Image (spheres, helix red, strand yellow):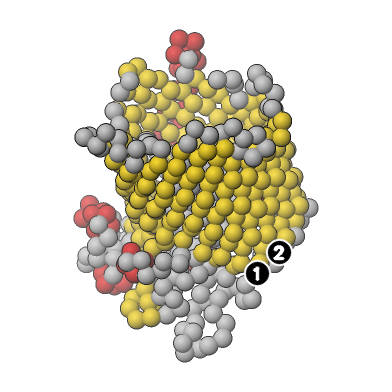
């Protein structure tokens, strides 16, 4: 699969060089930079939400090469290829494609194959702390995707009712407790309103299934066509599956309900979004109404010093409570253990990074990650983001995140063994800040990027980091 994608990418880009003048559809970009810090590892916001490009355990020197080739012969048809190659010198050096994909759009449907950057869930994509389902935190997962790229009007509603859908089949090819795990993803959103204001609601569903466990007593898990449909509809597993899968649901299922409201005026815009977590049937019944992400995003199109403001509140402590009757995800009822699973133990991670919110982080140690997945999934956090211009050619971005971190339930039955109930005790508090500047003179393809980031608290070492980069991006 990887070799095919690389051939498609390079072939498409090289062929387009000959016809670039006529098609005007080839775009090449590049970036050269370094990231370092006083504590020897990167502060949180110099590594988080960077598509897994940077190694948080050390300083990073890197080169990014990005290419896109697009063609649209008809209004109803377009296609293209794209890719981003990373060359990184760090504690964990790497040379890999962050992206490598081909895509075709016919009418309102698009198909893409490969590894492509995407965010699943409605958030402010510039200033958010990270969408709970799929954020920019991890290296993209290779998939086959069929989707509507944008909201599409339902015929006969004059634009008052729109839908947005997505289906994907993916392959988890990093080192995992269950090797060669399949990923199933889908979502459906409906949006209502005339355009100046809109209400929307969506359901996002993700599931791991199939693969071969490193535990020889489990071995190869069911992965036939019938098993796919059991996963698609979240049904009990059939014969040959582990007993827990037969009693409950085949595979590891999780996702969010996503609700929101947008208001657009000539100058100002407002977006309010609320994501509710679910990891089991109790979550689907809204038995964890406290848990989720609340966001408020404000835009001023004519603003200068402040163009955008975002506030988010993340709360994931309840998780159906400490214990209760029934076969919950991690054992007894309760303890939903977001992003983790008793069988697919590596959890909602990809190459060592959490695919969802980076505030719910994975074990850095690979051995621990194989059997524990996400180390910290019980979080209370406040996040603030600002963006604007300090001068015509100088833009800034500010992120500040305060969190209290409770780790995960430590496995004790707190009704029978009162006392310590969390992996982190007492819960460490943390403040992480980023100030990023982007200087690009008008009409010039080169931009200079400077960022300062810092960590203060008990979760990470007190740290001050610096990022310097030069980016080439051709003018539109």
Find the residue positioned furthest to the top. 22
Task: Please provide percent x and percent y for residue 410.
Answer: 52, 77
Crowdedness near tag 1: few (<14), some (14–19) or many (≥20) residues, C-alpha within 10 Å = some
Taking depth in this image into account, of 382 and 303 the one nearest to the observer is 303
Question: Which quadrant: the N terminus?
Answer: top left
Find the residue positioned furthest to the bottom: 416
Q: Residue at x 29, y 41 (%)?
A: 161
Residue linked to disc 1: 428
Q: Are marks 1 and 2 in contact (CB under 8 Å)?
A: yes
Q: Quadrant of residue 210?
A: bottom left
Report the label total.
2
Residue that appears at 26% across and 72% down: 247
Check residue 469 in the rendering and tell me which mark sits there, or answer none. Answer: none
Q: Position of residue 103 (x, y in %)?
A: 38, 31
Q: Which residue: 49% across, 26% down?
A: 68
Q: Is residue 464 above or below residue 22?
A: below
The location of residue 274, given as percent across then percent down, is: 44, 55
Can you identify the residue that label 2 sits on?
457
On the image, the x and y values in percent for residue 288 come to: 41, 68
């Amino acid at each position: 699969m990887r070799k095919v994608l690389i051939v498609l990418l390079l072939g498409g880009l090289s062929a387009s060089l000959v016809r670039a003048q006529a098609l005007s559809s080839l775009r090449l970009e590049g970036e050269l930079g370094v990231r370092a810090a006083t504590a020897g590892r990167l502060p949180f916001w110099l590594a988080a939400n960077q598509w897994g490009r940077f190694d948080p355990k050390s300083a990073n020197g890197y080169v990014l090469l990005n290419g896109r080739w697009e063609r649209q012969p008809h209004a109803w048809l377009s296609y293209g290829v794209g890719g981003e190659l990373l060359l990184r010198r760090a504690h964990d050096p790497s040379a890999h494609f962050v992206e490598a994909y081909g895509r075709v759009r016919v009418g309102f449907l698009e198909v893409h194959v490969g590894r492509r950057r995407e965010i699943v869930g409605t958030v402010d994509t510039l200033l958010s702390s990270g969408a709970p389902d799929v954020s920019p935190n991890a290296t993209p997962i290779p998939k086959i995707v069929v989707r509507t790229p944008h909201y599409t009007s339902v015929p006969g509603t004059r634009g008052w009712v729109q839908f947005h859908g997505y289906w994907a089949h993916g392959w988890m090819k990093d080192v995992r407790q269950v090797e060669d795990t399949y990923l199933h993803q889908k979502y459906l959103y409906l949006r209502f309103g005339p355009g100046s204001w809109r209400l929307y609601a969506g359901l996002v569903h993700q599931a791991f299934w199939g693969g071969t466990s490193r535990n020889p007593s489990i071995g190869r898990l069911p992965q036939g066509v019938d098993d796919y449909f059991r996963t698609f509809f979240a049904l009990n597993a059939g014969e040959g599956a582990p007993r827990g899968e037969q009693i409950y649901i085949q595979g590891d299922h999780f996702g969010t309900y996503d609700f929101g409201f947008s208001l657009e005026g000539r100058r100002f815009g407002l977006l309010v979004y609320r994501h509710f977590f679910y990891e089991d049937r109790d979550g689907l019944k809204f038995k964890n109404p406290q848990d989720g992400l609340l966001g408020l995003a404000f835009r001023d199109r004519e603003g200068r010093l402040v163009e955008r403001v975002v506030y988010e509140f993340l709360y994931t402590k309840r998780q159906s409570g400490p214990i209760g009757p029934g076969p919950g995800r991690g054992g007894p009822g309760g303890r939903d253990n977001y992003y983790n699973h008793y069988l697919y133990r590596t959890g909602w991670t990809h190459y060592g990074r959490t695919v969802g919110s980076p505030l719910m982080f994975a074990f850095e140690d690979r051995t621990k990650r194989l059997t524990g997945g996400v180390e910290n999934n019980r979080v209370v956090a406040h996040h603030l983001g600002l963006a604007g211009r300090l001068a015509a050619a100088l833009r800034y971005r500010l992120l500040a995140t305060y969190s209290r971190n409770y780790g995960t339930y430590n496995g004790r039955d707190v009704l029978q063994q009162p006392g310590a109930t969390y992996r982190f005790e007492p819960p460490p508090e943390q403040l992480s800040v980023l100030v990023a500047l982007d200087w690009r003179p008008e009409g010039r393809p080169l931009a200079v990027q400077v960022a300062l980031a810092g960590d203060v608290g008990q979760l990470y070492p007190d740290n001050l980091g610096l990022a310097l980069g030069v980016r080439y991006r051709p003018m539109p």
